[in-house]
Amino acid sequence: QSSSVVYLDPDIEVFSEFIPLNNLLKTKDIIITPHITKPIDDSFYPDENVFLNAGLYNLGFIAVKKTPNSENMLEWWSKRLLTKGFNDVKNGMFTDQLWINFVPIFYENVQILKDPGFNMAYWNLHERNLSINDSKYSVNDCPLVFYHYSGFNPLKPEVLSKHQNRTSLSNSAILNTLFTNYAQKLLNNKFKHYSAFDC
């Protein structure tokens, strides 16, 4: 039986080992990543208001160690999702994600992981600079652990994400290479076949 579980969305690519995360799980019960760690002061989308509606933390990733504290959190979360896990922003709901705003308040031993190499995605590109050296990616001089390709479609490879208009792949050779390689991997693994299935 596992002592901890790490969840990743299926549109995530892992680039390096989870060593910082494994070290944190020695002392922390619940680990989550914020969408952003710095203010957004431009007129592009998404802005800070989006995260007030969709959640401060991105649930494409969560790590949980088996403890009574985390089991209580999972029990509470599952109850909320059974009756209030909907995309209904005007009534204070956004799927599984918005509820996690409460976790650092309701539960102990919660780590808000701000390491820029964890959960890099369109929503935090304004604060994270990707570089490459000897075929290894870094983010703000930290190893890129995983990139979250939310809103990307390999059949429209020129569009970084359908959910944003802040960053263009044409303006970043490194991001363009990252996305080109990912798109090819998806296509090689029968993206067209599987994406045709009904939800």
Image: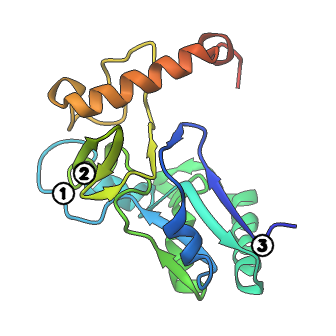
Residue under label 1 = 40
Q: Amino acid at mark 2?
A: Asp
Q: Is residue 153 visible?
A: no
Q: Residue 175, how many percent across, how many down?
A: 28, 33
Which one is in front, 118 or 34?
Answer: 118
Q: Would you call the spot at circle 1 few (<14 residues within 10 Å), some (14-19), or many (20 or more)? A: some
Quadrant hosting residue 196: top right
Q: Nearer the viewer, residue 93 or 28?
A: 28
Residues 21 and 8: in front is 21
53 displayed left or right of 42: right
Q: Residues within 10 Å of mark 3 (few under 14, many from 20)?
A: few
- Kind of residue at disc 3: Ser
Rendering coords of residue 52 (x, y %): 37, 61
Question: Mark 3 or 2, which is nearer the eye?
Answer: 3
Taking the spot 70% from the left edge, 59% from the top edge, the residue there is: 81
In whole angstroms, how far apart are the C-alphas of marks 3 and 2? 37 Å
N-terminal of the two: label 3 or label 2? 3
Are dots 3 and 1 in contact, CB under 8 Å?
Answer: no
Q: Name the amino acid, label 1.
A: Ile
Label placed on residue 32: none
Q: Would you name the residue on which mark 2 appears?
A: 47
Quarter holding residue 153: top left
- What residue does disc 3 label? 3
Asked if the residues shown at circle 3 and circle 2 are in contact, with their CB atoms under 8 angstroms apart, the answer is no
Residue at 26% from the left image edge and 45% from the top image edge: 130
Name the residue located 49 percent from the left edge and 69 percent from the top edge: 20
Is residue 147 shown to the viewer in this render? yes
Precedes in sequence: disc 3 or disc 1: 3
194 relative to 99, above or below: above
Whether tag 2 and tag 1 are in contact, CB under 8 A, the answer is yes
